[in-house]
Image (cartoon, helix red, strand yellow):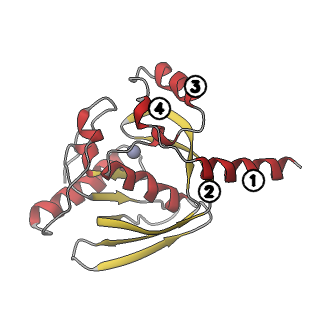
């Protein structure tokens, strides 16, 4: 067991597209276990390999509540095979200490990945539950995409980053997703009525 160092926003490695894991070797298993330990040590719900400096398509998630048994899930070479709906999500990231912003996410997703034994599994996460949002957040890390790239309000994000002494947003990385924004605005006007 080892606690790994988490790279902070501004590190180039967080912007790289990760490579597929070609073989689930002892080294990969140890890395995944250390990532789980590191996630717990930092009270996170997810952690992706590039955050610990490894250019590999692996992430770990545990969305269990405090009164529930631990339930770490390791995703290797994940693929999002279905996505639908839209939802607002207030997110943070272990690479952005104390910075939380509102971002856009799909509501429902289905992901396929390999576990540590090389077996394929499929997880469906619905209704914008934490697991659905966490999978999207961690999956993005493997593509070099960060949660702030999905910001609903860029000006708020700039302010939050500044307050937490983090580098500012990278305008060219912002993800254009008007359909998601439109759907979220529709939901917000419905709740107001
Ligand atoms: Zn993150």
Front residue of this view, candidates 14 and 53 = 14
**Total marks placed:** 4
Residue 155 is tagged as 3
Q: Which of marks 4 and 1 is nearer the N terminus?
A: 4
Disc 3 from disc 4: Cα separation: 17 Å
* Screen quadrant of the N terminus: bottom left
Residue underneath mark 4: 98
Ligand 1 is within 8 Å of the C-beta of the residue at disc 3: no
Of discs 3 and 4, which sits in the foreground?
Answer: 3
Viewer-side residue, 170 vs 32: 170
SS assignment at label 4: strand
Label 2 close to label 1 by CB (< 8 Å):
yes
Q: Distance between the residues labelled 2 and 1?
A: 9 Å
Disc 1 residue crowd, few under 14, some 14–19, many 20+, Cα 10 Å: some
Label 1 CB less than 8 angstroms from ligand 1: no
**Quarter, ligand 1:** top left
Residue 185, percent across and down? Answer: 72, 47
Q: Is mark 3 on a helix, strand or loop?
A: helix
Instruction: Give the secondary structure at mark 2.
Output: loop
Residue 65 visible in the displayed image: no
Q: Position of residue 22 (x, y in %)?
A: 14, 67
Q: Where is residue 143 in the image (x, y as percent from the top left)?
A: 32, 50
Q: Do the residues labelled 4 and 1 touch (CB within 8 Å)?
A: no
- Tell me the element at label 1: helix
Residue holding disc 1: 187
- Other residues around mark 3 within 10 Å, as few (<14) / some (14–19) / many (≥20): few
Q: Is residue 156 visible?
A: yes
Q: Residue at x 15, y 69 (%)?
A: 24
Q: Would you say the beta carbon of the disc 4 residue lies within 8 angstroms of ligand 1? A: no
- Which residue in the structure is indicated by mark 2? 86
Residue extending furthest toward the left: 26
Q: Earlier in the sequence, mark 2 or mark 1?
A: 2
């Amino acid at each position: 067991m080892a606690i790994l160092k988490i790279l902070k926003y501004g590190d180039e490695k967080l912007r790289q597209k990760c490579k597929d894991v070609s073989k689930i070797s002892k080294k990969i298993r140890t890395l995944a276990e250390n990532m789980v330990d590191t996630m717990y040590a930092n009270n996170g719900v997810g952690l992706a390999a590039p955050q610990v400096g490894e250019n590999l398509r692996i992430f770990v998630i545990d969305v269990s509540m405090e009164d529930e048994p631990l339930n770490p899930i390791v995703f290797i070479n994940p693929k999002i095979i279905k996505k639908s709906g839209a939802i607002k999500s207030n997110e943070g990231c272990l690479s952005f200490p104390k910075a939380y912003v509102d971002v856009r996410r799909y509501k429902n997703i289905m992901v396929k990945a390999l576990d540590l034994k090389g077996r394929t599994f499929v997880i469906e996460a619905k209704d914008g539950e934490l697991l659905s949002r966490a999978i999207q957040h961690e999956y993005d890390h493997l593509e070099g995409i960060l949660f702030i790239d999905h910001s609903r309000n860029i000006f708020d994000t700039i302010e939050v980053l500044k307050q937490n002494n983090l580098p500012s947003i990278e305008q060219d990385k912002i993800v254009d997703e008007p359909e998601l924004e439109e759907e979220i605005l529709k939901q917000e006007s419905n709740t107001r009525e």
